[in-house]
Image (spheres, helix red, strand yellow):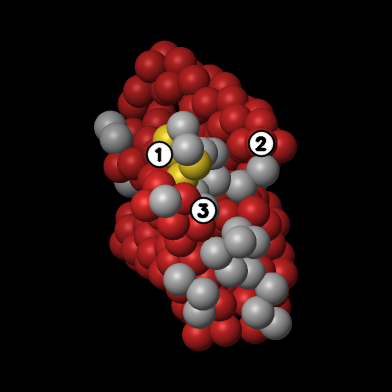
Amino acid sequence: MELQANAAAHPTFTRTGPRLAGDLAIWIFIMAELAAFAAFFAAYAFTRANHVEEFNLAQRALNRDAGAFNTLLLLSASACVVRAVQGALAGRARAAAPWMLAAIFCGLAFLGVKGVEYAAAFAQGITLSSSTFHMFYLSLTFFHFMHVILGLVILTALWFGLRAGRYGPRNMNGLESGAAYWHMVDLVWLILFPLVYVIH
């Protein structure tokens, strides 16, 4: 009886132990996306090893403070998403909606900061063909930028769902799937930022 009560109160656990949060399909999609980013990162690392001085020189021109601030924004967004999921799991979906809204604002701020970075780079005449480093920098960060946009679309849909009371202890699948995607976007940036902005 106690096991059944715990399973009902905490649906992320089953009789056989922890279950996969969200849909299996979203995890397959996430694995595919991570594989794509891993290929990008490997190509970057290999090319950098053969053009160390060129990459070091170009890296010094990047705005590390902006990159670090964006890291803080994405970490804050993920923390807010966690709070929203926890609130829904506790049966307080509507009360958890402001946490999701806060995550959305953090994500929008990330896009704003990155947009300012892009504008400054383009004003200096930097393009994909400027150098090998800039080709990787613009490609990698823009690929991630598009994932942030998709993540924000998902978070917005989840916010509406929370406000409507659509999620709860017995209906967490959609919320957990969306949260998992956003955490993937955050994880990729935690690798991308030091790789492109910091490591020499």
Badge nearest the viewer, 2 or 1: 2
Task: Name the residue beneath numbered marker 1.
Answer: 191
Q: Is residue 69 visible?
A: yes
Callout 2: 10 Å neighbours few (<14), some, many (20+)?
Answer: few
Dot 3: what SS?
A: loop
Q: Residue at x 37, y 52 (%)?
A: 2
In the picture of the structure, the residue carrying the numbered disc 2 is 24
Callout 2, which amino acid?
Answer: Leu
Write the residue at 66% across / 31% down.
28
In terms of secondary structure, where does tag 2 sit? helix
Query: Residue 127: image x %, image y %?
Result: 64, 46
- Mark 1: give few (<14), some (14-19) or many (20+) Cα within 10 Å: few
Q: Is residue 112 visible?
A: no
- Locate residue 48 relative to residue 139 in the image: left or right: left
Dots 1, 3 in contact, CB < 8 A: no
Cα gap from disc 2 to disc 1, whole angstroms: 24 Å
Residue kind at label 1, given as amino acid type: Ile
* Residue at mark 3: 11
From the top left corner, tell me how far across and down residue 11 is, in percent.
Answer: 51, 53
Residue 86 drawn above or below residue 194 = below
User: Can you say whether 194 is above or below 28 in the image?
Assistant: below
